[in-house]
Image (cartoon, rainbow, N blue to C red):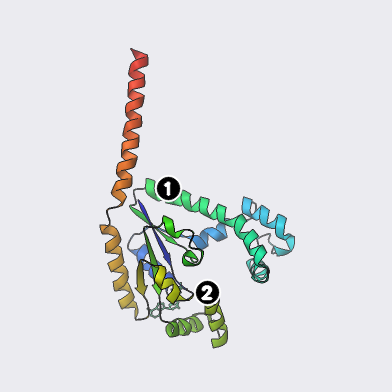
Amino acid sequence: MFLVGLSGGIASGKSTVVAVLRELGCAVIDADVIAREVVQPHLKAYQQIVRYFGTEILLENGEINREALGNIIFFHPEKRQLLNSITHPEIQKEMVKQILKYFVLGYRYVILDIPLLFETKRLIKFMKYTVLVYCDPQMQLSRLMKRNGLPQVEAEARIASQLPLDEKYKLASHVIDNSGDWENTRWQVLRLHSHLEDSLDFLWVRLAVGTVVAGFGGLVYLLLQHFIS
Ligand code: ADP
Protein backbone atom coordinates (compact mmCIF):
# COMPACT_ATOMS: atom_id res chain seq x y z
CA MET A 1 0.00 0.00 0.00
CA PHE A 2 1.12 3.57 -0.56
CA LEU A 3 -0.04 6.99 0.57
CA VAL A 4 -0.94 9.99 -1.56
CA GLY A 5 -1.03 13.43 0.06
CA LEU A 6 -3.50 15.91 -1.42
CA SER A 7 -3.68 19.61 -0.67
CA GLY A 8 -4.52 22.98 -2.16
CA GLY A 9 -5.19 26.53 -1.12
CA ILE A 10 -8.40 28.17 -0.04
CA ALA A 11 -10.97 27.88 -2.87
CA SER A 12 -8.43 26.31 -5.25
CA GLY A 13 -10.85 23.42 -5.81
CA LYS A 14 -9.70 20.68 -3.42
CA SER A 15 -13.24 19.68 -2.41
CA THR A 16 -14.21 19.52 -6.06
CA VAL A 17 -11.27 17.21 -6.87
CA VAL A 18 -11.87 15.03 -3.79
CA ALA A 19 -15.50 14.56 -4.83
CA VAL A 20 -14.38 13.17 -8.20
CA LEU A 21 -11.79 10.87 -6.60
CA ARG A 22 -14.42 9.50 -4.20
CA GLU A 23 -16.81 8.99 -7.09
CA LEU A 24 -14.08 6.92 -8.75
CA GLY A 25 -13.97 4.69 -5.65
CA CYS A 26 -10.79 6.04 -4.02
CA ALA A 27 -10.27 5.82 -0.27
CA VAL A 28 -9.92 9.40 0.96
CA ILE A 29 -9.11 10.35 4.55
CA ASP A 30 -10.09 13.91 5.41
CA ALA A 31 -7.79 15.44 8.04
CA ASP A 32 -10.21 18.31 8.62
CA VAL A 33 -13.04 15.97 9.55
CA ILE A 34 -10.73 14.06 11.90
CA ALA A 35 -9.53 17.34 13.45
CA ARG A 36 -13.14 18.16 14.32
CA GLU A 37 -13.85 14.67 15.64
CA VAL A 38 -10.91 14.45 18.05
CA VAL A 39 -12.05 17.54 19.95
CA GLN A 40 -15.55 16.21 20.61
CA PRO A 41 -16.61 16.42 24.28
CA HIS A 42 -14.93 14.03 26.69
CA LEU A 43 -12.28 12.75 24.32
CA LYS A 44 -8.65 13.08 25.47
CA ALA A 45 -7.85 16.17 23.37
CA TYR A 46 -11.05 17.90 24.49
CA GLN A 47 -10.19 17.44 28.15
CA GLN A 48 -6.67 18.76 27.66
CA ILE A 49 -7.88 21.78 25.70
CA VAL A 50 -10.36 22.69 28.45
CA ARG A 51 -7.66 22.19 31.09
CA TYR A 52 -5.24 24.57 29.34
CA PHE A 53 -7.55 27.09 27.70
CA GLY A 54 -10.33 27.19 30.32
CA THR A 55 -14.09 26.73 30.08
CA GLU A 56 -14.46 30.15 28.44
CA ILE A 57 -13.66 28.52 25.07
CA LEU A 58 -16.74 26.29 25.38
CA LEU A 59 -20.12 26.82 23.76
CA GLU A 60 -23.28 26.48 25.84
CA ASN A 61 -23.76 22.90 24.66
CA GLY A 62 -20.29 21.97 25.98
CA GLU A 63 -18.61 21.75 22.57
CA ILE A 64 -15.45 23.69 21.84
CA ASN A 65 -16.04 27.11 20.33
CA ARG A 66 -13.69 26.78 17.37
CA GLU A 67 -13.99 30.45 16.47
CA ALA A 68 -12.99 31.59 19.99
CA LEU A 69 -10.11 29.13 20.03
CA GLY A 70 -9.09 30.25 16.55
CA ASN A 71 -8.96 33.87 17.71
CA ILE A 72 -6.77 33.00 20.70
CA ILE A 73 -4.22 31.09 18.67
CA PHE A 74 -4.20 33.71 15.92
CA PHE A 75 -2.88 36.31 18.36
CA HIS A 76 -0.71 33.97 20.49
CA PRO A 77 1.58 31.75 18.42
CA GLU A 78 2.83 29.89 21.54
CA LYS A 79 -0.77 28.88 22.26
CA ARG A 80 -1.11 27.63 18.71
CA GLN A 81 1.86 25.37 19.39
CA LEU A 82 0.28 24.14 22.58
CA LEU A 83 -2.98 23.40 20.80
CA ASN A 84 -1.13 21.58 18.03
CA SER A 85 0.79 19.50 20.57
CA ILE A 86 -2.56 18.41 22.02
CA THR A 87 -4.47 17.73 18.80
CA HIS A 88 -1.82 16.51 16.33
CA PRO A 89 -0.99 13.20 18.08
CA GLU A 90 -4.71 12.38 18.30
CA ILE A 91 -5.29 13.29 14.65
CA GLN A 92 -2.33 11.19 13.56
CA LYS A 93 -3.47 8.20 15.64
CA GLU A 94 -6.91 8.35 14.01
CA MET A 95 -5.35 8.68 10.56
CA VAL A 96 -3.19 5.61 11.13
CA LYS A 97 -6.28 3.69 12.30
CA GLN A 98 -8.15 4.62 9.13
CA ILE A 99 -5.15 3.79 6.91
CA LEU A 100 -4.98 0.33 8.53
CA LYS A 101 -8.70 -0.13 7.99
CA TYR A 102 -8.31 0.56 4.27
CA PHE A 103 -5.26 -1.71 4.12
CA VAL A 104 -7.25 -4.57 5.65
CA LEU A 105 -10.06 -3.87 3.18
CA GLY A 106 -7.56 -4.40 0.38
CA TYR A 107 -7.09 -0.84 -0.91
CA ARG A 108 -3.81 -0.42 -2.75
CA TYR A 109 -3.44 3.25 -1.86
CA VAL A 110 -5.09 5.84 0.34
CA ILE A 111 -5.44 9.54 -0.40
CA LEU A 112 -4.84 11.80 2.59
CA ASP A 113 -6.58 15.15 2.24
CA ILE A 114 -4.41 17.39 4.43
CA PRO A 115 -4.95 21.17 4.26
CA LEU A 116 -1.49 22.10 5.63
CA LEU A 117 0.47 19.31 3.94
CA PHE A 118 2.89 21.69 2.20
CA GLU A 119 3.08 24.21 5.05
CA THR A 120 4.10 21.80 7.80
CA LYS A 121 6.09 19.55 5.41
CA ARG A 122 6.44 16.95 8.20
CA LEU A 123 4.12 14.41 6.60
CA ILE A 124 5.46 14.74 3.06
CA LYS A 125 8.12 12.08 3.62
CA PHE A 126 5.43 9.43 4.23
CA MET A 127 3.77 10.12 0.87
CA LYS A 128 4.67 8.34 -2.33
CA TYR A 129 3.02 11.16 -4.28
CA THR A 130 1.92 14.64 -3.31
CA VAL A 131 -0.86 16.28 -5.30
CA LEU A 132 -1.55 20.00 -5.37
CA VAL A 133 -4.90 21.32 -6.53
CA TYR A 134 -3.74 24.55 -8.15
CA CYS A 135 -5.69 27.51 -9.46
CA ASP A 136 -4.35 30.75 -10.89
CA PRO A 137 -4.39 33.59 -8.32
CA GLN A 138 -7.01 35.73 -10.06
CA MET A 139 -9.41 32.82 -10.44
CA GLN A 140 -8.78 31.73 -6.84
CA LEU A 141 -9.68 35.22 -5.62
CA SER A 142 -12.87 35.48 -7.65
CA ARG A 143 -14.05 31.95 -6.70
CA LEU A 144 -13.36 32.63 -3.02
CA MET A 145 -15.26 35.96 -3.12
CA LYS A 146 -18.19 34.27 -4.83
CA ARG A 147 -18.30 31.13 -2.67
CA ASN A 148 -17.93 32.89 0.69
CA GLY A 149 -19.63 36.15 -0.28
CA LEU A 150 -16.55 38.12 0.75
CA PRO A 151 -15.41 41.59 -0.29
CA GLN A 152 -12.13 41.64 -2.22
CA VAL A 153 -9.90 42.89 0.65
CA GLU A 154 -11.10 40.19 3.00
CA ALA A 155 -10.68 37.45 0.40
CA GLU A 156 -7.18 38.73 -0.37
CA ALA A 157 -6.30 38.67 3.34
CA ARG A 158 -7.42 35.05 3.65
CA ILE A 159 -5.36 34.01 0.64
CA ALA A 160 -2.35 35.97 1.94
CA SER A 161 -2.47 34.13 5.28
CA GLN A 162 -1.59 30.86 3.47
CA LEU A 163 1.58 29.72 1.73
CA PRO A 164 1.16 30.93 -1.90
CA LEU A 165 0.04 28.26 -4.35
CA ASP A 166 3.12 28.97 -6.47
CA GLU A 167 5.33 27.92 -3.53
CA LYS A 168 3.34 24.73 -3.00
CA TYR A 169 3.64 24.07 -6.73
CA LYS A 170 7.39 23.52 -6.32
CA LEU A 171 6.86 20.93 -3.58
CA ALA A 172 4.21 18.78 -5.27
CA SER A 173 4.95 15.69 -7.35
CA HIS A 174 1.62 16.09 -9.23
CA VAL A 175 -0.48 19.17 -9.97
CA ILE A 176 -4.15 19.37 -10.94
CA ASP A 177 -4.63 22.79 -12.51
CA ASN A 178 -8.19 23.83 -11.70
CA SER A 179 -7.99 27.26 -13.36
CA GLY A 180 -10.16 26.10 -16.25
CA ASP A 181 -13.63 24.60 -16.46
CA TRP A 182 -14.99 21.52 -14.62
CA GLU A 183 -14.49 19.24 -17.63
CA ASN A 184 -10.82 20.09 -17.88
CA THR A 185 -10.28 19.43 -14.17
CA ARG A 186 -12.23 16.19 -14.32
CA TRP A 187 -10.08 15.00 -17.19
CA GLN A 188 -6.90 15.71 -15.16
CA VAL A 189 -8.30 13.85 -12.15
CA LEU A 190 -9.10 10.85 -14.35
CA ARG A 191 -5.51 10.88 -15.62
CA LEU A 192 -4.14 11.04 -12.06
CA HIS A 193 -6.48 8.21 -11.05
CA SER A 194 -5.26 5.91 -13.80
CA HIS A 195 -1.66 6.73 -12.87
CA LEU A 196 -2.36 5.74 -9.26
CA GLU A 197 -4.19 2.59 -10.33
CA ASP A 198 -1.25 1.58 -12.52
CA SER A 199 1.32 2.10 -9.77
CA LEU A 200 2.67 -1.22 -8.57
CA ASP A 201 4.37 -0.14 -5.36
CA PHE A 202 1.71 -1.72 -3.21
CA LEU A 203 3.01 -5.14 -4.35
CA TRP A 204 6.18 -4.73 -2.33
CA VAL A 205 4.22 -4.12 0.86
CA ARG A 206 1.93 -7.07 0.13
CA LEU A 207 4.98 -9.24 -0.57
CA ALA A 208 6.73 -8.12 2.63
CA VAL A 209 3.61 -8.68 4.77
CA GLY A 210 3.01 -12.02 3.04
CA THR A 211 6.58 -13.14 3.74
CA VAL A 212 6.36 -12.17 7.41
CA VAL A 213 3.00 -13.93 7.83
CA ALA A 214 4.23 -17.05 6.01
CA GLY A 215 7.44 -17.08 8.06
CA PHE A 216 5.52 -16.74 11.30
CA GLY A 217 3.10 -19.49 10.26
CA GLY A 218 6.02 -21.78 9.43
CA LEU A 219 7.62 -21.12 12.80
CA VAL A 220 4.38 -21.91 14.65
CA TYR A 221 4.04 -25.13 12.62
CA LEU A 222 7.60 -26.24 13.47
CA LEU A 223 7.08 -25.48 17.17
CA LEU A 224 3.83 -27.45 17.22
CA GLN A 225 5.51 -30.40 15.49
CA HIS A 226 8.31 -30.25 18.05
CA PHE A 227 6.00 -30.24 21.07
CA ILE A 228 3.53 -32.79 19.73
CA SER A 229 6.17 -35.36 18.76
P1 ADP B 1 -11.56 24.32 -1.83
O1 ADP B 1 -12.16 23.02 -1.34
O2 ADP B 1 -10.19 24.17 -2.35
O3 ADP B 1 -11.66 25.42 -0.83
P2 ADP B 1 -13.81 24.32 -3.69
O4 ADP B 1 -13.72 22.97 -4.31
O5 ADP B 1 -14.87 24.54 -2.66
O6 ADP B 1 -12.40 24.80 -3.11
O7 ADP B 1 -13.97 25.38 -4.87
C1 ADP B 1 -14.11 26.76 -4.60
C2 ADP B 1 -15.32 27.34 -5.33
O8 ADP B 1 -15.04 27.37 -6.71
C3 ADP B 1 -16.59 26.53 -5.15
O9 ADP B 1 -17.69 27.41 -5.09
C4 ADP B 1 -16.65 25.69 -6.41
O10 ADP B 1 -17.97 25.40 -6.76
C5 ADP B 1 -15.98 26.59 -7.44
N1 ADP B 1 -15.18 25.84 -8.44
C6 ADP B 1 -14.23 24.94 -8.18
N2 ADP B 1 -13.70 24.47 -9.31
C7 ADP B 1 -14.33 25.10 -10.33
C8 ADP B 1 -14.21 25.06 -11.76
N3 ADP B 1 -13.32 24.29 -12.38
N4 ADP B 1 -15.02 25.88 -12.49
C9 ADP B 1 -15.91 26.68 -11.87
N5 ADP B 1 -16.06 26.79 -10.54
C10 ADP B 1 -15.28 26.00 -9.76
Q: Quadrant of residue 211?
A: top left
Q: Residue furthest bottom?
A: 152
Residue that label 1 marks: 100
Q: Is mark 2 within 8 Å of ligand 1?
A: no
Q: Residue at x 56, y 81 (%)?
A: 157
The quadrant the C terminus occupies is top left
28 or 195, which lies in front? Answer: 195
Mark 2 closeness class: few <14, some 14–19, many ≥20 residues within 10 Å: few
Q: Quadrant of residue 112?
A: bottom left
The amino acid beneath tag 2 is: Gln
Q: Is 134 left, or right, of 42 in this rendering? A: left
Q: Is 88 left, or right, of 97 in this rendering? A: right
Residue that label 2 marks: 162
- Asked if one can make out residue 144 in the rendered structure from this viewpoint, the answer is yes
Q: Residue furthest top?
A: 229
Is 100 rendered above or below residue 183? above
Q: CA distance from mark 2 to mark 1?
A: 31 Å
Q: Residue at x 47, y 58 (%)?
A: 123
Q: Residue at x 37, y 80 (%)?
A: 179
Ligand 1 quadrant in view: bottom left
* Residue 163: x %, y % from top left: 50, 73
The amino acid beneath tag 1 is: Leu
* Residue 195: x %, y % from top left: 27, 62
